[in-house]
Amino acid sequence: MLRSGTSKPSRRNVLKGVGMATVGASLGASLPLGGAAHAQGAPAAAKGPKLLEMDGKAKLAILGDRPLVAETQAELLDDNVTPTNKLFIRNNGQVPDVTGDPKAWKVKIDGEVNTPMEITVGDLMTKFPAVTYQLMLECGGNGRSFFTPEARGNQWTNGGAGCPMWTGVRLADVLKAAGLKPSAVYTGAYGADPTLAGETNKPSISRGVPIAKAMEEHSLIAFKLNGQDLPLIHGAPVRLVIPGWPASASTKWLNRIWIRDKEHDGPGMGGFSYRVPKTPIVPGSKGDAKDMAILESMPVRSIITFPADGSKLTSRKLDLRGHAWAGDFDIKSVDISTDYGVTWKPAKVDAPANKYAWQNFTASIELPTTGYYEVWAKATDSKGVTQPFQAANWNPQGYGANPVNRIRVLVES
Amino acid sequence: MTRLNVIHAAVLGLTATFLLLAFDRSGALHRDKYVYVPPAPKVAAAPPVVDPDKGKPPPHNDTVEDLPEGKNRELTFYTCTACHGVALIKAQGLTRDLWDSTLDLMVEKFRMPPIKAEERTEILDYLAENFPPRRKGRGSDNPFLK
């Protein structure tokens, strides 16, 4: 591993392939299409993202190799419960060394609490009841590649999201044990990941949430993912899972929760990070940091996971499926259009497995002729808020892009 | 003769004794009793096998040539890839203004060491020249964008 601040040739180059310039460019101009095009049964297209080669992980699309950032192609998100190998990867720093006894790992709870404590993972597991939920984890920048012009950052399509099973203890139970003072208003979470520059004594990122969100029953200190110990890349031995909010609040390699008497001000809380404009700004402009508000609940989004974008179909009849989710809210409906939004047909939407789980939808459609079609999906949440036709509320770091999902299919006779 | 016989008897007796002792020590005379085991050579206790890189991302291997040719390419490469990969740079398409604020973000959020003003200008020149906005559409020719 390169740990220092210099760039040296590494032991081997397993990330083969050409540069990434084609990724943004190929998504570019016109429509917010999800992911690279692959024809079903046909050889993989020459263009498209580099694919991840890593033990325990599927061939996710690499958005950046240092720090490693990889998204899950829509067709790989087809499972109702996202398998661990298909969960997206986002790092803000380097991956820390985690080599000791996981149960001896310590998490410090301090700040505005009556009883500051340092609790081991072993004690967390024995002193508090464990709960398991299916919870959305979604990068705050999910959908960023749909902004025109480009917004700064990793160019996610819709694949910075997944909905696996998480097991852990409720953050609320731990905070109650520490005893929140009346002055407690916000959390500030820290992980063990070194900065990109290699410093181990400085946070790579440190975000938090208002106490009310931290105290929700689905906010967890998690130690299992899909029933297995957390893999290192997903935050072993313990991480936060703050569902429905930007995943940067779901701190990996958790080692400290600082209870604040004001809004947390760690790296990643200020400026344009995880913030959206209070008043709309001219797309492509520099913006004003004083006019930005923290992005809390993630916006409503839907993805078609079958068929894959770029599929060749042999029948005009199509049974499609996908998932929809909306941050803190439920999905009320999902509608499907095959005529560029002129007419819409409701999909069948399942109830979530629990609050903060995505909802599966299915639809049986019949395309009127052979030829080229786009299939669009548009979800509406329990507040009646739906997806825009193009990414809205442009902002310099590109949060909140959730245009209708579009796949391209070719019906052959 | 008598003296010689005594010496012979003593030598033979001692030889037999040593042979018996040798067999005895090797365990050949009483396999069920004990076997001499030479002391094991001293070896430091092996540390537990822990690979700190296990489960970490695969290594990477960027070179200057991964960036497009242009003035100030080397300065840009070595400044930026001290912390992150070339792919992150190449995925961006930003105006000079936004590249400028990107350098602020690197310093303020990502703890990039401060750089000299003239080097910052040279890096900005390179980035703005080689990675301008690429997505065309209503956003790229906005009448309100200077």
Image: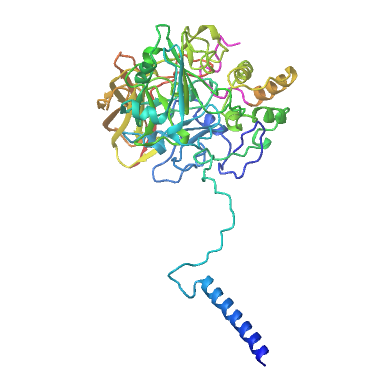
**Residue B134, how many percent across, how many down?**
57, 24
Quadrant of the snapshot with the N terminus of chain A: top right
Residue located 57% across and 81% down the image: B16
**Residue A59, how many percent across, how many down?**
46, 40
Answer yes or no: is residue A325 visible. Answer: yes
Residue B137 sits inside the magenta stretch: yes
Figure check: A271 above or below A353: above
Quadrant of the snapshot with the C terminus of chain A: top left
| Residue range (magenta) | B131-146
**Residue B3, how many percent across, how many down?**
67, 88
Figure check: A200 above or below B66: above
Which residue is nearer to you in this view: A347 or A235? A235
Indicate the colouring scheme. Answer: rainbow
Locate residue A369 relative to residue B36 in the image: left or right: left
From the image, give the main secondary structure of the stretch colored magenta. Answer: loop
Which residue is nearer to you in this view: A358 or A238? A238
Answer yes or no: is residue A310 visible. Answer: no
Which residue is nearer to you in this view: B94 or A110? A110
**Residue A205, how many percent across, how many down?**
53, 22
Locate residue A390 relative to residue A325 in the image: left or right: right
Locate residue A341 relative to residue A271 in the image: left or right: left
Residue located 64% across and 36% down the image: B66
